[in-house]
Every structure is written in C-alpha cells, then in structure tokens.
Image: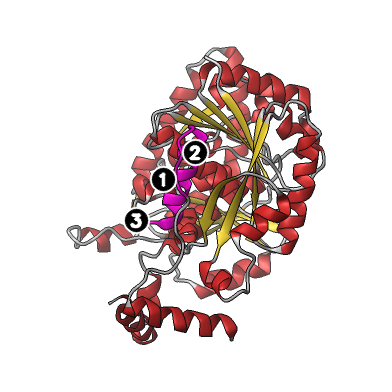
C-alpha cells in the first residue's frame, strides 16, 4: 500500500495547524483509514496535547532518527482509535536536530503501511517548514480571514508551487465568523479564495467548543453536535474524494434567529 | 427558545458562586494536564522514569510509614527559577520502632543477596538515600505518639497529612512550616 502524505502548513502561527491536523487525522481514522500524524514542530510540540496523548510519549521523532528506537516503537496509538497513531516531536531539541532527507525517509517508510501520513508543520518558512514539506506530495494551507494570516498563506503557496514534489495544495479557511462577515467586518470566504486563487477544501467556523476540546485533549470531530466538528468531518470526506457541499454558516432563519442576529450585529459594531 | 436560554444562562451565571462555575469545567482538566506536561518539559523526565522514581520512593518510605500508596502524589513545581519536587503522602500511621527495624533488616538482607557486580550499584543507592532516610527517622520519632490517637477512630476516613519534599531556601522553609499544620514535615534536599 502506498499512502498519501499530506503536510498541514500555514506560515503564520496560531491559525490552527495543529488543531486541523488532529481533527482531520481523527476524522480519517474514524472512517477506517490507517493514519499517522507526525508533529514536526521540534522544541514546541503540541499535537500530543490536542490528542490527549501527552503522557504516553516515550520516544520521539529525534529518537527514531538518531536510532535510539525503531520507528514502530515511537508510534503512540490513540486512546480511542487504534487506526490513529502519533509520532511526536522532541521537546528538548530544536529544528536543526532533523534534516529534510531524514524526514522524507520517515514519511516514505510510514506511507508503506498507512493510508495517510499527516504532517503538522511548524510556523515559519525556515528549516522546519522545509523539513516538514520534504516528504509530502500534497499540502493543506490553513489560514484565517485576517490580513496577516492571508499574506503569510500567500507566501507559503508561492513556496509550495516552487516545490516539484507537491502535486496539489488546497486552502482551509479557519475561524470564520459569519456574523462578522455579514456586518462586512470580516473578509468573506469568496474574498479570501479570490485573493489567494487557491482551491478550497474546507471552511471551519469559529467555535468555542475548540477551547473545551483542547482542554480535554479530545478532538472536536468526536463531538457530533459541534459545527466545527462537522466542518472538519466534511474536510476529511473531501480528502477522500467525495463531493460535500460547504456548510451553510448563515444564521438559521426564523423570528428568534432574526432578533438574535440583530443583537449579534450590534455587539459586533460596539 | 435559543435567545431566552442564552439570556437566562448569562444572567444565572452572574449569581452563581465562582467555585461552582469552576467545578467540572474543562479548564480544571486543562490546568492539571498542563502542569504535568510542563513538569515533564522542565525536568526532561519521561513518564516511565517518574513512575520508577515514585516506586522507589514508596519502597523507601514504607519502611517507616504505613501510607495510602494509591493517593501518593509526586509533583514538580516552579518556584522562581528553581524547580521543587513536591511529594504528598497520605499517611495512615507511622510504624513503631520494632516494625522499622524489621523492615530495615529485610531490605538489608535483600541488598546482600545480589552478586558482586550489582553490589556496587546498591552501595551508591544507599549513600544517596542515607540523608533522606535519617530525616525520615527523626520524623517518625516525633510522631510515635500519634497512632494511639488514630487507632481509636480507625473507622473514620483515612487521615491525609501532607508531606513535602522540596528544594528551597531555608528561610522559605521556616515560613512554610509555620504556615501549615505541625504535622507538615519538610525534607531538605540540596539536589536540584
């Protein structure tokens, strides 16, 4: 079997790369695919926290590279889903502990036995980014509808285009707030897609549930009632080649909803 | 209905006591998980090594004390630029002198058994432990009267006395001892 290797990147920090990696990985594993998540943010690892696996990590990617353990030993299985495993970043080393060749080698080995290898990329465009991208053939660029994030995403898209190995890249627009878009205080999905001229793979609404899910170490895709969870499940479906319409993030129509909407707009203006 | 329930919740929240809001909330879970993770990051000790350390500490202390091993807590805390190791042990009762002697004998026998190669390692362990062991002994002496009191109310919930083993400045330690109950015993450890 030859799995797909997808890097999740953004340029800017704090736009939700790690959250996206954890959720897409969990969603794909729930669909029955074998998934490995690789945290390549050496020195600043966090993917383990979002998956609630922080206490199970014994070996990291640096241990694998420096041959202190076998690759298989370093894979930490998810608590709920045996299809999902994590290769954690080392917390005590920096980005120079790994090079692009070594990471590519690990990806090549992992894709033989898994359907998906998802790489959580560090912020920035330096060595860490170059390492993370080395083994991937697809990319998901995460951005939010804010100027700085869009500018950085544009830079990343430029770098990805220059990479021969990257066959396709898609945009994931995170933390969208329909209220703000309606009151013309936030760039709309169409605006962002037009500016970046990049195909879209998902629109994730801002959801306070993300905070609680992070607190608990439980990806939000496991919450059937969450809108963001549903949006991430849809992204997984699209990765699998299904055509899923984008969620309608507009306020529900109805008398009460309209009143609520007025309040929301007032609040947004204040 | 959504609007009304939203308003109700917001209003109700104002009148709820702070503690009630905190209880069961995910932020408590987050804070606990973070503390553990930061401790690991700061000390670079893996969960496996911590578990081993915990086991060894239990072995050592159970020579002198009868304690609730399940509830034993081992935590690292940051105090300024120093890391302190906090050990909290729910003590059921202190052992009497005969019992302690017996336990020490038993462990001494264990140590003489292994062959010469491993003996060296054992010796190192002993020298490392000796300081703590002494402290522990003086502590048990000061508490020998207590089990009598306790035995009369054996059915009552297990007494939970906190002990801490920490690295800190002497002045801090004094204030620490005064603050908490007289049952608090502080081991001094110069290692960091």
Q: Are marks 2 and 1 on the same chain?
A: no
Could you tell me residue B108's position as x and y percent?
47, 28
Q: Residue at x 77, y 32 (%)?
A: A97
Q: Residue at x 54, y 12 (%)?
A: B115
State which mark lies toward you, 2 or 1: 2
Check disc 3 and report the residue beneath it. Answer: A225
Magenta residue check for A131 = no
Q: Describe the element under mark 2 as helix, strand or loop.
A: helix
Q: Are marks 3 and 1 on the same chain?
A: no
Could you tell me residue B105's position as x and y percent?
42, 31
Residue A68 visible somewhere in the drawing: no
Q: Give the total of numbered labels.
A: 3
Check disc 1 and report the residue beneath it. Answer: B64
State which mark lies toward you, 2 or 3: 2
Q: Residue at x 48, y 79 (%)?
A: A264
- Res. A258 mark: none
Q: Chain of mark 1?
A: B
Could you tell me residue A228's position as x and y percent?
46, 55
Check disc 2 and report the residue beneath it. Answer: A238
Magenta residue check for A242 = yes
């Amino acid at each position: 079997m030859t799995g797909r290797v997808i890097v999740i990147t953004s340029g800017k920090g704090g736009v939700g790369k790690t959250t996206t990696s954890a959720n897409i990985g969990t969603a794909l594993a729930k669909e029955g695919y074998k998934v490995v998540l690789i945290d390549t943010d050496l020195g600043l690892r966090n993917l383990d926290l979002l998956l609630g696996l922080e206490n199970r990590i014994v070996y990291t990617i640096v241990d694998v590279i420096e041959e202190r353990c076998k690759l298989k030993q370093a894979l930490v299985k998810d608590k709920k889903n045996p299809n999902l495993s994590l290769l954690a970043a080392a917390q005590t080393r920096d980005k120079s502990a790994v090079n692009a060749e070594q990471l590519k080698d690990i990806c090549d080995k992992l894709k033989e036995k898994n359907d998906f290898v998802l790489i959580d990329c560090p912020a920035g465009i330096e060595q860490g980014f170059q390492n993370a991208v080395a083994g991937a053939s697809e990319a998901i660029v995460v951005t939010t509808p804010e100027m700085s994030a869009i500018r950085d995403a544009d830079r990343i898209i430029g770098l990805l285009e220059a990479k021969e190995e990257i066959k396709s890249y898609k945009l994931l627009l995170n933390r969208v707030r329909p209220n703000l878009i309606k009151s013309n205080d936030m760039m709309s999905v169409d605006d962002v897609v037009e500016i970046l001229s990049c195909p879209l793979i998902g629109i994730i609404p801002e959801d306070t549930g993300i905070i609680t899910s992070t607190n608990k170490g439980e990806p939000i895709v496991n919450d059937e009632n969450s809108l963001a969870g549903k949006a991430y499940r849809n992204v997984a479906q699209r990765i699998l080649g299904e055509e899923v319409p984008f969620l309608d993030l507009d306020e529900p129509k109805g008398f009460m909803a309209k009143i609520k909407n007025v309040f929301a707009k007032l609040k947004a203006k204040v | 209905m959504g609007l009304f329930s939203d308003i109700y919740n917001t209003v109700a929240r104002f009148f709820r006591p702070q503690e009630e809001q905190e209880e069961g909330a995910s932020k408590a879970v987050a804070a606990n998980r973070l503390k553990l993770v930061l401790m690991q990051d700061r000390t670079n000790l893996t969960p496996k090594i911590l578990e081993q350390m915990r086991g060894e500490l239990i072995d050592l202390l159970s020579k002198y004390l009868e304690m609730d091993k399940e509830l034993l807590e081992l935590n690292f805390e940051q105090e300024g630029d120093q890391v302190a190791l906090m050990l909290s042990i729910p003590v059921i009762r202190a052992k009497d002198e005969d019992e302690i002697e017996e336990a020490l004998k038993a462990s001494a026998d264990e140590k003489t058994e292994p062959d010469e190669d491993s003996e060296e390692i054992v010796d190192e362990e002993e020298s490392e432990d000796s300081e703590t062991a002494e402290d522990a002994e003086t502590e048990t002496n000061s508490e020998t009267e207590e089990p009598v009191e306790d035995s009369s109310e054996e059915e009552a919930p297990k007494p939970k006395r906190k002990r801490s083993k920490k690295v800190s400045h002497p002045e801090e330690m004094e204030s620490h001892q005064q603050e908490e109950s007289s049952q608090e015993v502080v081991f001094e450890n110069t290692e960091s």
